[in-house]
Amino acid sequence: MDHDGTRDRAADGILDAAEDLFYGQGIQAVGMDAVRAASGVTLRRLYQLFPSKGDLVEAYLLRRDERWRADLAAYVDEAAVEPREQLLAVFDWLAIWFAQPAFRGCAFVNAFGELGASSLAVASAARHHKAEFAAYLARLTTAAGAPPATAVHLALLAEGAITTAAIRGDSTPAAEAKEAARVLLAPTAV
Amino acid sequence: MDHDGTRDRAADGILDAAEDLFYGQGIQAVGMDAVRAASGVTLRRLYQLFPSKGDLVEAYLLRRDERWRADLAAYVDEAAVEPREQLLAVFDWLAIWFAQPAFRGCAFVNAFGELGASSLAVASAARHHKAEFAAYLARLTTAAGAPPATAVHLALLAEGAITTAAIRGDSTPAAEAKEAARVLLAPTAV
DNA sequence: AGGAGGCGAGAACGGTCGTTCTCGCCCGAG
DNA sequence: CTCGGGCGAGAACGACCGTTCTCGCCTCCT
């Protein structure tokens, strides 16, 4: 038995490798043997911890969702205190994300496009991720005293910025979306 | 030789089948034999017209890009004459697209997420498609007398609406994006 | 009329993938 | 000391994929 965390540490290493590979190359393009090689674990243990590739994919998406949202919230929390400024800080965080060399768009959008039609687990992971992000923006928006519809508009801008930055391969869409967000947050400007 | 259009008609049928399958299930999930079966053509002819799957994918994306933009422009042209109204009509067209049962997001975003990391042809097809769409919005925006930055903002909204509609599986993001677009197009409102 | 070349149908080939099995080895219980 | 159960390493298996080849047949030039 594993009284210590050997099992969990192995699972984390596998998930680290799987995340790099799945996100960087696409899920179908990465074989289980590549995950094994990158995580330094044996194939037997890999299947003990994740009985099928589908399970591994699901765990990859779940962990990424939680870490992505936690990282965003942590950045926003220390970037600003006023809700309106926090909403704008979301786009600053996107800019930092987009500038990372490994950035390749939203993992959930990519997984949905690849497997959403055949895997219900992938489709609902993507739905959940986007719903949670929308709910986060909605909380900030009501705290800022802006109408609820504004939260939806900002979510569309962020979503568009992510996809556009991925395909254009540059990070300026974050700043562009922030400009638009500023307009949407100032209904009766000047 | 084919003096008549037999060859071209066969190619069209293959592309029709390939488009249904690639868009509906993802590119890697569809084998060449499935394309052959759906198009009623023989495997030999399929490879005569498209020497590799990569060629077929490229042709699929190219034809889809042109038809998508032509359909959009045709709708917008007959929906409104004033440039500002035409910009808003773009989102009405998106709503119609999203409501189609087979709608599964942007074919180029999906292909990019699946193959963009490994296929330069797919990556540049996606870049080209998005650049052309952005240029179209830029033309309408300058015709409407709005600042060029507004075109970029509207493109982000449209992009976000496409992805959000795909993942949520409903067509309301088009109307939500249209609301936001109206705000962005009325800088000094009321 | 005859033969050569193109066609349809599908088998075949080499490679890869997800998953499981084999086999020798170690380690701890009795 | 012994022996059984779990381990690492990798081979093996069945399925599938992209692509090519085989093999009759049909057809069109001369």
Image (cartoon, coloured by chain):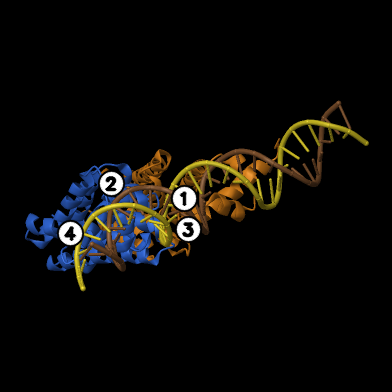
Chain colours: A orange, B blue, C brown, D yellow
Q: Which of marks 1 and 2 is in front?
A: 2
Residue B157 in percent (x, y) is at: 26, 55
- What is the secondary structure assignment of the residue under circle 4? loop
The CA distance from mark 2 to mark 4 is 23 Å
Report whether A166 appears left or right of B158: right
**Residue B130, image quadrant:** bottom left
Q: How crowded is mark 3: few (under 14 residues within 10 Å), some or many (20 or more)?
A: many
**Residue B45, image quadrant:** bottom left
Where does label 1 land, which residue?
A68
Three-letter amino acid code at disc 4?
A: Leu
Where does label 2 land, which residue?
B165
Three-letter amino acid code at disc 3?
A: Gly
The CA distance from mark 1 to mark 2 is 21 Å
Q: Nearer the viewer, mark 2 or mark 4?
A: 2
Res. B185 mark:
4
Residue under the image location 16 percent in, 68 percent down: B142
The verdict on a common chain for dots 1 and 2 is no
- What is the secondary structure assignment of the residue under circle 2? helix
Q: Is label 1 in contact with label 2 (beta carbons under 8 Å)?
A: no
The CA distance from mark 3 to mark 2 is 25 Å
Q: Is label 3 in contact with label 2 (beta carbons under 8 Å)?
A: no
- What is the secondary structure assignment of the residue under circle 3? helix
